[in-house]
Image: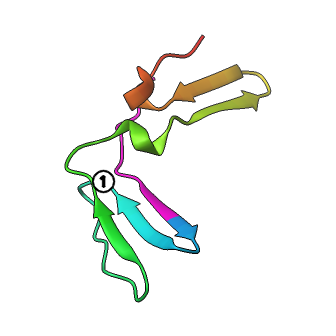
Amino acid sequence: MRIEPHARVYIEPYPNARRVAFEPGLPVRPLDGYTMREFRDRHMFFGGVQAVQWCPGEGLAAVADSPRSGVTA
């Protein structure tokens, strides 16, 4: 099963550097007190996400974030 990737956003709430980091494709508006950090392309900065779900009668279903190769085992 292949899931289409979606743009991601990350709030960096550090005391001296409050930022909103985001990938293209999101309708992000400036926030008071935050610097906007826009990435031009999908970026490894946002890390990888993996998820597993158990469905009785169907077994395990697994997905992985496509920037990290989208591979599950």
Pick whichever, 39 or 68, lies toward us. Answer: 39
With 59 as the anchor, is 45 left or right in this view? left
Residue at left 47%, top 70%?
Answer: 17
With 29 as the anchor, is 50 left or right in this view? right
Q: Can you give x and y, in whole percent of width and height, for residue 1 in the image? A: 45, 23
Indicate the quadrant where residue 68 lies.
top left
- Residue 26 falls inside the magenta stretch: no
Residue at left 41%, top 79%?
Answer: 34
Q: Secondary structure at mark 1?
A: loop
Q: Which stretch did the figure color magenta?
A: 1-11
Q: Can you give x and y, in whole percent of width and height, for residue 27 in the image? A: 28, 70
Q: As shown in the figure, which amino acid type bears the numbered disc 1?
A: Glu
Above or below, 73 against 50 in this view is above
Magenta stretch, main secondary structure, is loop
Numbered marks: total: 1
**Residue pointed to by mark 1:** 23
Q: Residue furthest front?
A: 16
Pick whichever, 69 or 2, lies toward us. Answer: 69
Q: Residue furthest right?
A: 56
Above or below, 18 against 31 in this view is above
- Residue 5 falls inside the magenta stretch: yes
Above or below, 47 against 62 in this view is below
Indicate the quadrant where residue 42 lies.
top left
Residue at left 30%, top 53%?
Answer: 23
Residue at left 33%, top 40%?
Answer: 43
Q: Residue furthest left?
A: 40
With 28 as the anchor, is 56 left or right in this view? right
